[in-house]
């Protein structure tokens, strides 16, 4: 997988924006202003994604391409090398998991913005 594929995939998700809050070399994807993926454009062979703590430990033990989040909270973030043994499907699942974790952490009124058909229930 490459950075362009990741870029397009992230932007295809509801209410995602790309920003550069840490400088021109760090691409950050946010859902409603909360980060779910970061990539250093100078080292575009890896990404940081949010992860459930128990799942993070399991993934780190199983795959050498997954390590505690570089410059991030190491309990909740993984650094994932996108070039290696991990499949594109696995990488996309990690992006989805990160996005979903952030969405679940949003207040209910912001979650409703992502899924307006649930507002009528």
Image: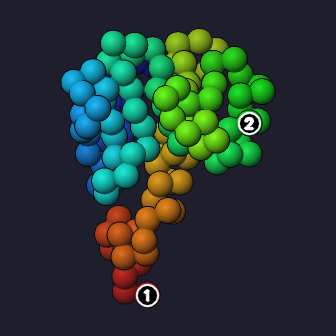
Q: Give the mark nearest the N terminus, 2 or 1.
A: 2
| Nearer to me, 75 or 82 | 75
Q: Which label sits on residue 121?
A: 1
Considering depth in this image, is 34 or 113 the residue closer to the camera? 34
Question: In the image, residue 82 lies at what x, y percent?
Answer: 51, 19
At 31% from the left and 26% from the top, the residue drawn is 26
Q: Is residue 115 above or below residue 46?
A: below
Say if 45 sits above or below 10 in the image: above
- 38 up-or-down from 50: above or below: above
Q: Nearer the viewer, residue 58 or 77?
A: 77
71 up-or-down from 111: above or below: above
Where does label 2 land, which residue?
57
Q: Quadrant of the C terminus?
A: bottom left
Residue 76 position in % (x across, y down): 59, 43
Q: With 106 as the anchor, is 93 left or right in this view?
A: right
Residue 6, quarter of picture: top left
Q: What x and y, as percent, mark residue 2?
A: 40, 18
Q: Residue furthest bottom?
A: 121
Disc number placed over residue 21 in the picture, else none: none
Percent x, y for residue 71?
A: 49, 29
* Circle 1: element type: loop
Considering the numbered disc 2 on the image, is that residue within a helix, a strand or a loop? helix
């Amino acid at each position: 997988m490459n950075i362009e594929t990741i870029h397009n995939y992230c932007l295809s998700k509801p209410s995602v924006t790309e920003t550069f809050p840490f400088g021109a070399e760090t691409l950050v994807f946010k859902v409603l202003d909360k980060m779910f993926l970061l990539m250093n454009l100078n080292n575009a062979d890896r990404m940081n994604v949010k992860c459930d703590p128990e799942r993070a430990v399991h993934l780190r033990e199983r795959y050498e391409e997954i390590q505690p989040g570089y410059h991030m909270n190491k309990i909740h973030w993984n650094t994932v090398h996108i070039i290696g043994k991990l499949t594109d499907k696995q990488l996309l699942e990690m992006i989805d998991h990160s996005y979903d974790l952030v969405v679940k952490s949003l207040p209910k009124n912001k979650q409703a913005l992502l899924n307006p058909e649930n507002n009528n229930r």
